[in-house]
């Protein structure tokens, strides 16, 4: 198993011109690749190092498939660009002209990056946080577009590729195995999907720019002045900025932790607040407003939790052979994909600012 000791960190700090002495360090995240493959040399370890001057930094060690020195360098450069343009995000330390470097530690080859530790992690998303987060995302989008910033990496919120919200390929695989009335309804749903993707296709040919890629409660922080910042550019890559805005908004409205009293109403409350914050900085165009109902309907219809992850998901019902539950899901999915809800229906134009 990959391990680091203080002398390893001290060597890294010399290269990154960090002069304060190390007090101690703790692990923030570790992927145990060796559990599935004892011979694995893949590494993902993130540590927080506490320094004698009272500050702390985050050191990331990586050696993973599809993760290159060039990718980590470009992600760090984008993060630093945002910081330099007054986005609240941790400073990325450099070694010479580089943010990322290869090291050999304990017989492992790893890429190392170093950044400031972000104090004040946001753990609960309420209306003011959602609105501020939407505005923050819009500011990062403006900077990426103005500076022609790019990160050559797939993102998790891209409707034109495999993504973490919209599980259409999994639905299509199940549909191909259905028979009778269930197959007829599934084919109708697939027809709607294809129709909507054709409508959305102009978005797929628009310019793509760098995005942080994973704004959420665990990647946001708030300073003493109430300003919202973001960290963790692990999923940073290029995306259509409008698609990123909508899918990040839905992600924050459905899958975060919320205050008491938001139960069953999180999307009703959070989604309009996030989108209002976004459009206060980067107004939606008429074309984008026209696209919203179709993109929203696809996300709602093929919501990942309902298709795969929840205990009573479509996939689990199919695997159990529970055709009654499968048919029930098909009816729900058909209703969701058939009901087109505009931005106005989502409350975007009626919600008063809460921040």
Image: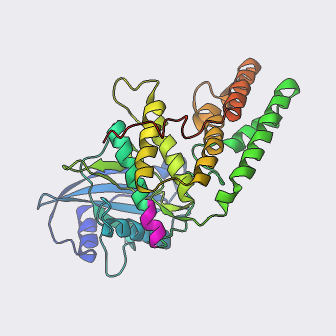
Quadrant of the image for the N terminus?
A: bottom left
Q: In this view, does 332 lie above or below 297?
A: above
* Residue 83 shows up from this direction: yes
Q: Give the range drawn in magenta.
A: 141-147
Chief secondary structure of the magenta portion: helix
* Residue 158 shows up from this direction: no
Quadrant of the image for the C terminus?
A: top left
335 or 93, which lies in front? 335
Q: In this view, does 334 lie above or below 43?
A: above
In percent of width and height, residue 200 lies at: 68, 52
Report the residue at 54% width, 38% height from top.
344
Q: How is the image coloured?
A: rainbow
Report the residue at 68% width, 59% height from top.
202
Q: Is residue 8 above or below residue 54?
A: below
165 or 296, which lies in front? 296
215 or 273, which lies in front? 273
Point out the residue furthest to the right here. 180
In this picture, residue 86 sits left or right of residue 270: left
- Image quadrant in which you'd find residue 114: bottom left
In this picture, residue 15 sits left or right of residue 142: left
Report the residue at 31% width, 43% height from top.
122
Report the residue at 58% width, 52% height from top.
286
Point out the residue furthest to the left here. 53
In percent of width and height, residue 58 lies at: 29, 59
Q: Does the magenta stretch include residue 144?
A: yes
In percent of width and height, residue 291 lies at: 63, 48
Point out the residue furthest to the top here. 324
Q: Is residue 46 above or below residue 332?
A: below
Q: Is residue 78 magenta?
A: no
Count of numbered circles in the view:
0
149 or 6, which lies in front? 149
In percent of width and height, residue 70 lies at: 49, 73
């Amino acid at each position: 198993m990959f391990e680091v000791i203080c002398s390893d960190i001290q060597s890294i700090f010399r290269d990154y011109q960090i002069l304060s002495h190390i007090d101690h360090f703790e692990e923030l995240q570790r992927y145990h690749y060796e559990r599935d493959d004892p011979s694995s040399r893949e590494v993902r370890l993130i540590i927080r190092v506490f320094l004698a001057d009272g500050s702390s930094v985050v050191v990331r060690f990586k050696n993973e498939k599809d993760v290159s020195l060039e990718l980590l360098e470009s992600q760090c450069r984008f993060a630093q660009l945002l910081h330099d343009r007054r986005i609240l995000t941790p400073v990325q330390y450099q070694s010479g002209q580089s943010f990322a470097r290869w090291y050999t530690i304990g017989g492992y080859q790893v890429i190392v990056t170093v950044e400031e530790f972000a104090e004040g992690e946001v753990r609960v998303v309420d209306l003011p946080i959602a609105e501020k987060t939407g505005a923050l995302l819009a500011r990062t989008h403006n900077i990426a577009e103005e500076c022609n910033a790019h990160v050559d990496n797939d993102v998790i919120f891209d409707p034109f590729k495999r993504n973490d919200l919209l599980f259409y390929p999994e639905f299509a695989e199940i549909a191909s195995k259905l028979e009778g009335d269930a197959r007829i309804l599934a084919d109708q749903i697939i027809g709607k999907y294809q129709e909507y993707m054709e409508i959305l296709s102009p978005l797929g040919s628009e310019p793509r720019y760098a995005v942080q890629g994973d704004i959420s409660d665990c990647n946001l922080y708030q300073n003493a002045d109430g300003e919202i910042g973001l960290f963790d550019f692990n999923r940073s890559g290029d995306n259509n900025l409008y698609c990123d805005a909508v899918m990040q908004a839905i992600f924050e409205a459905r899958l975060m932790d919320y205050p008491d009293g938001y139960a069953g109403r999180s999307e009703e409350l959070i989604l309009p607040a996030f989108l209002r914050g976004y459009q206060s900085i980067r107004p939606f165009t008429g074309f984008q407003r026209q696209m919203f109902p179709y993109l929203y309907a696809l996300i709602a219809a093929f919501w990942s939790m309902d298709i795969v992850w929840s205990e009573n998901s479509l996939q689990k019902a199919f695997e159990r052979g529970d055709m009654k539950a499968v048919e029930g899901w098909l009816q729900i999915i058909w209703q969701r994909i058939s009901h087109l809800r505009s931005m106005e229906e989502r409350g975007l134009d009626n919600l008063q600012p809460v921040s």
